[in-house]
Amino acid sequence: MVNTTKNKYVDFISDQHFMKCVGDLFKAYENTKNEYTEKQFYKNKIDPIKLTFDMKFNNLTEKEMIAAEIQRQADKNISNFIGHFHEELMGGITEFEHIKNAGYDLRKVDNTIFAEIKNKQNTVNSSSKETTYQKLQRFAETNTDAKCYWVSLIAGNSYCEQWNQKFEDRTYNHPRVYKVSGDRFYEIVTGDKHAFMKLCTAIPHAIDEYLEKYTSTLKPNNTKVYSDIYSKATKNGVSVTNQLFNDNFNKYNGFPIK
């Protein structure tokens, strides 16, 4: 049900909760601006073969190549933070809750709605998609009145339909498991078909007001990672590119490259 209280930003979430979510996302952005370390750079396995193609075909220096990879990693983290923003935001809608590590991203407190929320559908591989379906199906089977949704916030069109899908040799077609676009899901949880549009309209104003109180810091140059790898490469008598190969494939046959 739509909250009829006159709010500053949207009429289905309190201003206080809205700004808390904006603030949490701001802090997440700020954390991505910390100077990267070599350990962070290698935390998720990089693809030095792709980086070499990127460098050669895009006419980048080795330093620019590493800076671009750091930015890619940061952008991937930001995409995850945006999904968390929506989860937290919708957790402030009356009768809904978002609890970290609860097994669902959003739940109606009477157990009639469960949702798994993704920022973009095309970022989910087949294995993860099947796992998501199985999770939603368990919620539907455990709660006989529940409708369970796989939400794609950024989708190609507006839709809400039963989710029937075949994964290799197994077909899933539970009658209360759905896939839904962001706009239609916001309508489901608020009762307002224009709720998502209202949110999109409100976000720039909320950000501007937040930044009147808090200053965004500049991105670091992130030169330390390059400097550290360059130092190792020099010591080992190889190029920075070959040092990336050696660091990444240090347990593969034939490495390190000399």
Image (cartoon, rainbow, N blue to C red):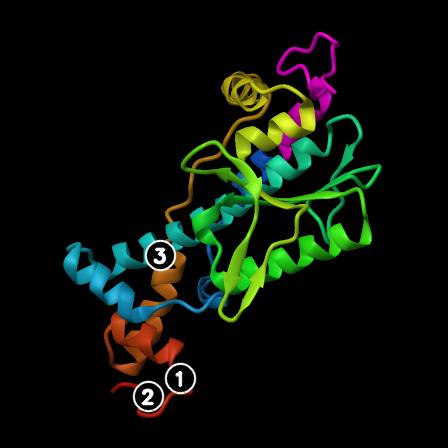
**Mark 1, secondary structure of its residue:** loop
Please name the residue shown 81% across and 41% down the image.
111
**Is residue 257 positioned above or below 80 on the image?**
below
Q: Residues within 10 Å of mark 2 (few under 14, many from 20)?
A: some
The disc placed on residue 69 is 3
The range drawn in magenta is: 1-24
**Is residue 45 positioned above or below 55 on the image?**
below
* Residues at circles 2 and 3 in contact by the CB criterion of under 8 Å: no
Residue that sits furthest to the bottom in the current view = 253
Q: Which residue is mark 2?
A: 255
Task: Give the position of the N terminus as an image quadrant.
Answer: top right
Q: CA distance from mark 2 to mark 3?
A: 23 Å
| Tag count | 3
Q: CA distance from mark 2 to mark 1?
A: 6 Å
* Residues at circles 2 and 1 in contact by the CB criterion of under 8 Å: yes
Task: Give the position of the C terminus as an image quadrant.
Answer: bottom left
Relative side of 242 to 125, left or right:
left
Q: CA distance from mark 1 to mark 3?
A: 20 Å
Please name the residue shown 33% across and 88% down the image.
255
Closer to the chain start, of discs 2 and 3, is 3
The disc placed on residue 250 is 1
